[in-house]
């Protein structure tokens, strides 16, 4: 990623400056080689205004974890000492040695998030991503620890918090975006794009970006960067554009560098999709010329997610309906939401729409609110575009704390064998639970485990 300043989570990051004296956290290589431009011409952006009812997704510094800040500081110091060739040691006490207690510490069991039939020994090929990368076999196991481990990454400055906030299937594996969450930027933090193979091959960095979107077929990954500041600002300046281009899975650029509005939301066979983060409107762009392409969608569509050439969006009047629109043909399938259930608040970055292998069914979270408008429960549903029905996945109905201070993340995805997997996590408390559903009977659940995965995805074929 481009140069950036920072003092870690405990202090306000200090932006470095480019040749023109403009604070920045991320610039494209082409921008850094270009002649210096006046600060007013670059018009840096920091926090985008999301408009009514919109909110950034997955921004949780997790400073509430017991000992989290101290652990990060100690880890950062150890990294720095190791890099300098110094052997690091941990000083436990300054007084006389004390005899260890004979009784082992016993940790309390983690609360259950999902309900169903306990299962052991089942396996799948799913990847999980959050403050670590996991691959789910008989049990989830950590992978690619050289790129991300316990919220730190050697790809980022020492001591900066890291999180994989996007995960998508590509041939032979998945790609993930590792964000530098220490910057405090909530709409796409600077970071690295990493390819994780499903087999024994090595993981590799393929790009630097603030946001990614995978094209149909998965062989091209669109990346977007932006000149960013850390100060709190409002909205996007008129005419602001961001360098946007496509790379292949070995990191080679395979498209022109386009100047598009910030807000990469998806990628189609024609080119990338951007979302206006004030109005929520989508715009499709020609991937070769960078010119706008007309969309066959209502202007007031409430965008939810994209997957290749299909876009999911909501229309809510007296009731809410989920639409799945094929941007190539204009075909649209609408599925009504169950009574009293509502779509989650629009957010950015958008989650990848998760379809089953047939492309007919979609899994998504919905929420239910009380008479005061407070969200009380969330659950995962399967929307069937062929039958026009939506069904709750058993065992995924999760009540929320009355205080509303404990965020809950629900996600689902089909693996390549056709099993539907559900994930529920409480990121601020650092634990999660997995389960899978065959389409009939109860959910089969694993015990809750430590970790904070935010996303899950099967690898692509190949």
Image (cartoon, rainbow, N blue to C red):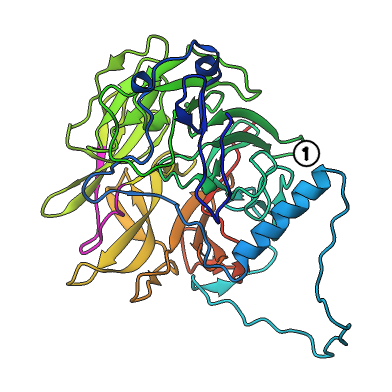
Image position, residue 51 (x, y; %): 23, 44
- At 25% from the left edge and 24% from the top edge, which residue is drawn? 295
- Which quarter of the image is occupied by the C terminus? top right
Q: Please provide percent x and percent y for residue 291.
A: 32, 13
State left or right for residue 110 relative to residue 311: right
Furthest residue to the front?
21
User: x and y percent of residue 263 in the render?
Assistant: 36, 32
The count of marks equals 1
Q: Is residue 378 visible in this depiction of the protein?
A: yes
Residue 225, position in %: x, y?
A: 47, 28
The relative height of residue 128 versus residue 69 in the rendered view (above or below) is: above
Q: Residue at x 25, y 58 (%)?
A: 342
Camera-side residue of 401 and 184: 184
Q: Residue furthest left?
A: 318
Check residue 339 for magenta coloring: yes
Q: Is residue 216 magenta?
A: no
Residue that appears at 28% across and 33% down: 276
> In the drawing, does residue 372 fall left or right of residue 250?
left
Q: Which residue is nearer to you in this view: 134 or 132?
A: 132
Mark 1 — residue? 200
Which stretch did the figure color magenta?
A: 333-346
Tell me: residue 139, above or below residue 226.
below
> Is residue 256 shown above or below 459?
above
Magenta portion: prevailing SS class: loop
Q: Nearer the viewer, residue 90 or 329?
A: 90
Left or right of 449? Residue 56 is: left
* Rendering quarter of residue 101: bottom right
432 vs 74, nearest the viewer: 74
Q: Based on the displayed image, in which of its 4 quarters is residue 91 positioned? A: bottom right
Residue 450 seen by the camera: no
Quadrant, the N terminus: top right
């Amino acid at each position: 990623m481009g140069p950036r300043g920072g003092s870690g989570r405990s202090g306000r990051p200090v932006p470095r400056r480019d040749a023109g004296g403009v604070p920045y956290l991320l610039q494209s290589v082409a921008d850094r080689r270009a002649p210096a431009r006046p600060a007013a011409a670059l018009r840096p952006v920091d926090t985008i205004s999301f408009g009514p009812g919109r909110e950034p997704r997955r921004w949780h510094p997790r400073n509430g974890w017991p000992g989290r800040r101290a652990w990060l500081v100690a880890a950062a110091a150890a990294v720095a000492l190791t890099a300098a060739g110094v052997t690091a040691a941990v000083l436990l006490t300054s007084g006389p040695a004390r005899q260890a207690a004979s009784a082992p510490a016993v940790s309390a069991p983690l609360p259950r998030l999902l309900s169903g039939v306990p299962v052991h020994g089942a396996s799948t090929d799913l990847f999980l991503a959050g403050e670590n990368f996991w691959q789910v076999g008989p049990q989830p196991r950590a992978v690619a620890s050289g790129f991300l481990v316990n919220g730190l990454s050697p790809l980022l400055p020492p001591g900066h918090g890291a999180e994989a906030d996007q995960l998508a299937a590509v041939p032979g594996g998945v790609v993930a975006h590792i964000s530098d969450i220490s910057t405090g930027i909530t709409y796409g933090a600077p970071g690295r794009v990493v390819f994780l193979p499903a087999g024994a091959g090595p993981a590799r960095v393929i790009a630097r970006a603030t946001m990614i979107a995978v094209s149909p077929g998965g062989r091209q990954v669109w990346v977007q960067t932006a000149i960013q500041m850390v100060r709190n600002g409002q909205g996007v300046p008129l005419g602001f554009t961001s360098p946007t281009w496509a790379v292949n899975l070995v990191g080679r650029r395979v498209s022109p560098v386009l100047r598009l509005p910030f807000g990469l939301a998806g990628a189609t066979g024609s080119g990338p999709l951007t979302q206006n983060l004030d109005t929520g409107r989508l715009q499709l762009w020609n991937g070769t010329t960078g010119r706008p392409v007309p969309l066959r969608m209502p202007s007031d569509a409430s965008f939810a997610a994209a997957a290749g050439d299909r876009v999911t969006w909501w229309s809510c009047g007296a009731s809410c309906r989920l639409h799945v629109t094929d941007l190539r043909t204009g075909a649209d399938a609408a599925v009504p939401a169950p009574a009293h259930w509502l779509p989650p608040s629009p957010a950015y970055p958008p989650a990848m729409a998760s379809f089953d292998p047939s492309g007919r069914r979609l899994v998504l979270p919905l929420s239910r609110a009380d008479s005061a408008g407070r969200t009380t429960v969330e659950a995962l549903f399967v929307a069937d575009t062929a039958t026009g029905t939506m069904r709750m996945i058993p065992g995924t109905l999760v009540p929320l704390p009355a205080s509303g201070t404990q965020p809950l993340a629900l996600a689902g995805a089909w693996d390549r064998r056709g099993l539907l997997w559900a994930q529920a996590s409480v990121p601020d408390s650092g634990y999660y639970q997995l389960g899978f559903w065959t389409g009939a009977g109860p959910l089969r659940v694993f015990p809750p485990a430590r970790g904070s995965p935010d996303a899950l995805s099967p690898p692509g074929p190949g």
